[in-house]
Image: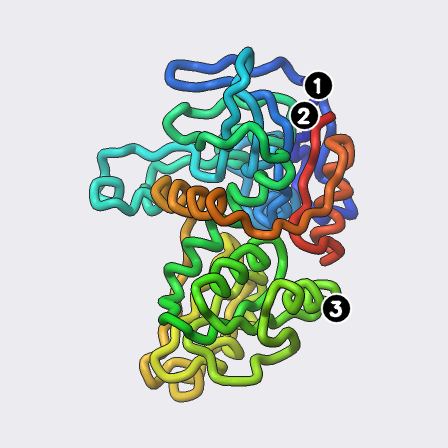
Amino acid sequence: MRAWVVAEPGPMATRPLELVELDVPEPGPGEVLVRVEACGVCRTDLHLAEGDLQPRRPRTTPGHQVVGRVAGTDERVGVAWLRSTCGTCRYCLRGTENLCPRSTYTGWDADGGYAEYLVAPRDYVYPLPGDVPAERLAPLLCAGIIGYRALLRCDLPPGGRLGIYGFGASAHLTAQAAIAQGAVVHAVTRSAASRALALELGAASAGDIPPEPLDSAILFAPVGTLVPAALEALDRGGTLAIAGIHLTDVPVLDYERHLFQERTLRSVTANTRADGRAYLELALAHPPRVTTSLYPFEEADRALTDLANDQVNGAAVLVNS
């Protein structure tokens, strides 16, 4: 089979991805072999390719928003970021398996979906409908799920004012979920195309700063210098959730300006399978508008380059022919 691997992490201009021929993997006990139809392109993949996220194994195949069929069947499944947990630690036992110290991840600890096939543990794949285009489903499996968990973590009150910093794949799905719940959404993004998309999706504003104090905020952009501004934009008792796996350094915070009046700063770490099931049930019952930029499988390196240069509107998706 054909697969992309991270040959040598570095800036996309150095071409860190390499398209290679590999043997089709063989599933082990409790695993399924999945023939990939489409795979979403996530900023986490970019962090892995460029070395911001330290590789856990050499020449890993990225990709963790995989839609495909169990080999030899018509069974449609989704393979997401969380690949396995121990099931016995105190975090797993209390329902926070996303914090399991022995958790593993698709496209980081094991080869992911920038390939024609991958293997995944049966207990960690999600059933998907067979009649929805794969490119519409793929972004739901990380952009959607992580955005859903970030929305839970930011403690958005009913009818609250939500700021979303950065407006890419995850943000455009999260905004729709929040608006459907009655929230007033303000998008903060530099991109003219992203501003236009935010307004099309129902955001109350899209610009450089929110026009009113916020009850909650989510930071999707991996830019630590935005943290003070996002905290300062919160109203009393507001919460900022940082949704990314990687963030550049956060500047020194001023207690009175950024944290006083019970403003809260939270991180978001992966997701639980319960998060995934809850979000997919919601998204399949009330389908969001999924804005995608489609790339042929052979152009995975171009997709990540476009993502690095903020030239993707919505979600980038690799499609296997």
Which comes before the other along the chain, label 1 or label 2?
2
Q: CA distance from mark 3 to mark 1?
A: 39 Å
Which SS class for mark 1?
strand
Give the labeled residue for mark 1. Answer: 21
Which comes before the other along the chain, label 3 or label 1?
1
Q: Nearer the viewer, residue 233 or 181?
A: 181
The reply to whether the C-beta atoms of the residues labelled 2 and 3 are less than 8 Å apart is: no
Q: Nearer the viewer, residue 255 or 145?
A: 145
Give the labeled residue for mark 2. Answer: 3
Q: Position of residue 45 (x, y in %)?
A: 60, 43
Residue drawn where x is 68% and y is 63% of the image: 197
Q: How many marks?
A: 3
Mark 2: amino acid: Ala
Question: Can you tell which quarter of the image residue 313 is in?
Answer: bottom right
- Crowdedness of circle 1 by 10 Å Cα count: few (<14), some, many (20+)? few
Residue drawn where x is 47% and y is 25% of the image: 120
